[in-house]
Image (tube, rainbow, N blue to C red):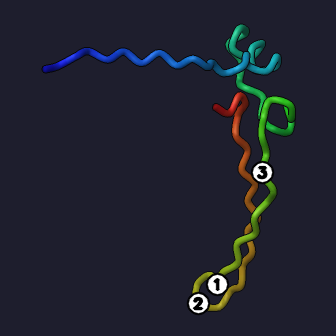
Amino acid sequence: MNAPVIYIPSTQPPPLPLLRQLAYQREETLPGPHDDPKGWTTLEPVTISGILLDDVEVDAEYTLSLAKPVS
């Protein structure tokens, strides 16, 4: 026996941050984490160390920012 199943989530994400809404309305480039810190969730920086071309020590620092709402 088969039965159709319809899934409707009971939760919805909050509205987009104001600066992002304005950018979409104006068809502009979305503001990044530096221009709109309230519109992003930014994680702590991570440093990665390694050796490049067999003899050059390098360190690279990365910061991950996720656009809100994160859901």
Q: Is residue 12 above or below residue 52?
A: above
**Is 17 left, or right, of 13 in this rendering?**
right
Residue 31, x across and y down, in percent: 78, 28
Q: Nearer the viewer, residue 44 or 5?
A: 5
Residue most extreme to the left: 1
* Residue corresponding to mark 2: 54
Asked if disc 1 and disc 2 are in contact, CB closer than 8 Å, the reply is yes
Which circle marks residue 51 in the picture? Answer: 1
Q: Nearer the viewer, mark 2 or mark 3?
A: 3
Sequence-earlier tag: 2 or 3: 3
Secondary structure beneath dot 2 equals loop
Q: Is residue 55 above or below residue 21?
A: below
Is the N terminus in the top left, top right, bottom left or bottom right quadrant? top left
Q: Residues within 10 Å of mark 3 (few under 14, many from 20)?
A: few
Secondary structure beneath dot 3 equals loop
Residue most extreme to the top: 25
Which circle marks residue 43 in the picture? Answer: 3
Q: Nearer the viewer, residue 70 or 54?
A: 70
Task: Give the residue at x 73% y 30%.
Answer: 68
Q: Is residue 14 above or below residue 25?
A: below
**Is 34 left, or right, of 14 in this rendering?**
right
